[in-house]
Amino acid sequence: MLEIYALGKLFLTISWIFLGLRGMIPNTVSIVLGNVFLIGGIAAEMLVISSYNHSDYKFRSKLYFFVAVISTLLFIAFLGQPENVRIFISSFLLAMIVGIGVFYLFQQTIKSKLHLLVSYIYLFLSLSLILRGLVVLFIDKETTLLSYSGIQSFAFITFLLVTYMGAISLLLLLKEQDEEELIKKATELDVANAKLTATIASKNQFLSIIGHDLRGSIGNIAQMSDLITHSKDLLSEQEYQLLKSTLFKSSTLTYDLLENLLSWSKAQSANIQVNRVSVGLNNCIIQVIDHIQGMANEKQISIIKSIDPAIKVFADLEMIKVIIRNLLSNAIKFTPVSGTITIISAVVNQEVKITVTDTGVGIPLEIQQQLFSDNFNYTTSGTKSEKGSGLGLKLVKDFVELNQGTIEFNSSPNEGSSFSFTLTLAN
């Protein structure tokens, strides 16, 4: 844009040279070339002045080019008219070009004092050109711009002053815009840094909790394994069986936690690959139930499955297993002994809706609105003091969305919860 502005100034300089050579070279050459370069120079200057903040620059460049060409052709068409008529036409055309720029300057939504000052300076130039044309046409027939005529001297001085003031004003406007951009970017950077700091703090706390849980679980497994290995003769049969059962439960929970941690770390990576293929939903759910059936048996919880064996979904198989495993594990965790969990499916508008419902303790009302928030970590012990990390539902939400689905839930304290998510029906 600065190059275009410089080109405009060059055109104006050439214009003044040709107009100043009037009488020394053929008048037709002096008048035509002088006014052609004058129109081009003013058009280039007003294009840059009215678009210095890059607002709709491409459209305006085309508009000014069109206006400059039409103005040049109109001026040439009036070459045969009396000189005062020709000056009126030239002044009117130049005023129109400046006026377009003034209109765009006043249209800008963000106006500083400098911006308004520049707008009024060019408005003054536009009005001066119109006044010059009217005076030359109807009052003072003096047509030489470089003469002692009052209106001609006024127009010439105004033109020069505005031209040079315009160059200074443009540099000041660009400096002001740069400062505004720097302030804006600094503000955006501060906001981004604050969010990043909060996210890092949240994840550090989150990983600290998981590390604590893993250390505790693995420590318990090590102690129980040591008892079973080296102190079996000191244990009664009942104590031995209880120890084996506890060891199995602790191992299963630790395995699930590690699986979730690995899945979560993949989900945080920008390079995570989603391999969506046609998946038999019923077989997928059976595999997950087989994996967690031992946890359900520990609490004598019935898992009732009602899935159409013919349904196939278009999704990532491993991600779907993680989703269902976490929803069922949460349902087992928060369902009392002898409770019931149901998992059903329904086809709705080329989507499959899978719903996991339990007869558990439900989710507190104050927690429900933040349950899926990235910066919120909610974990509580289950009905038999089962540990949790708060990682499961984050994974469920992320993996459902990565598979182009949605998730929702309904829960009432002491009445149970129902989690539903959608997947694309496979053709």
Image: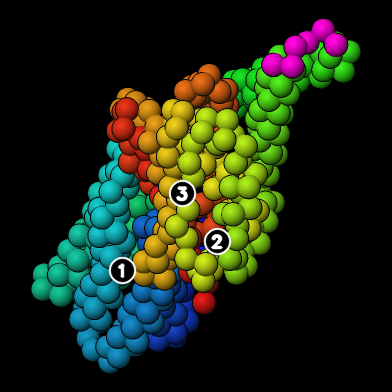
Circle number at residue 114 = none
- Magenta segment, prevailing SS (helix, strand or loop): helix
Residue count near mark 3 (Cα–Cα under 10 Å), binned few <14, some 14–19, many ≥20:
few
Q: Mark 1 packing: few (<14 Cα in 10 Å), some, or many (20+)? A: many
Circle on res. 282: 2
Residues under numbered marks 2 and 3 in contact, where contact means CB atoms less than 8 Å apart: no
Which element is circle 3 on? Answer: strand
316 on left or right of 306: right
- Measuring 31% from the left and 44% from the top, which residue is drawn there? 110
Where 393 sits versus 96, above or below? above
Can residue 7 be seen here? The reply is: no
What is the quadrant of residue 223 in the picture?
Answer: top right
Per the rendered image, the range of residues in magenta is 233-238
Three-letter residue code for mark 3: Ile
Nearer to us of marks 1 and 3 is 3
Q: Earlier in the sequence, mark 1 or mark 3?
A: 1
Work out whether residue 349 or residue 121 is closer to the camera in this orientation and state it: 349
In the image, what residue type sits under mark 2? Asn
The residue singled out by tag 1 in the image is 97
Compare residues 273 and 306 and report the one nearer the observer: 306
Residue designated by label 3: 304
Give the image location of residue 272, x and y in percent: 67, 51
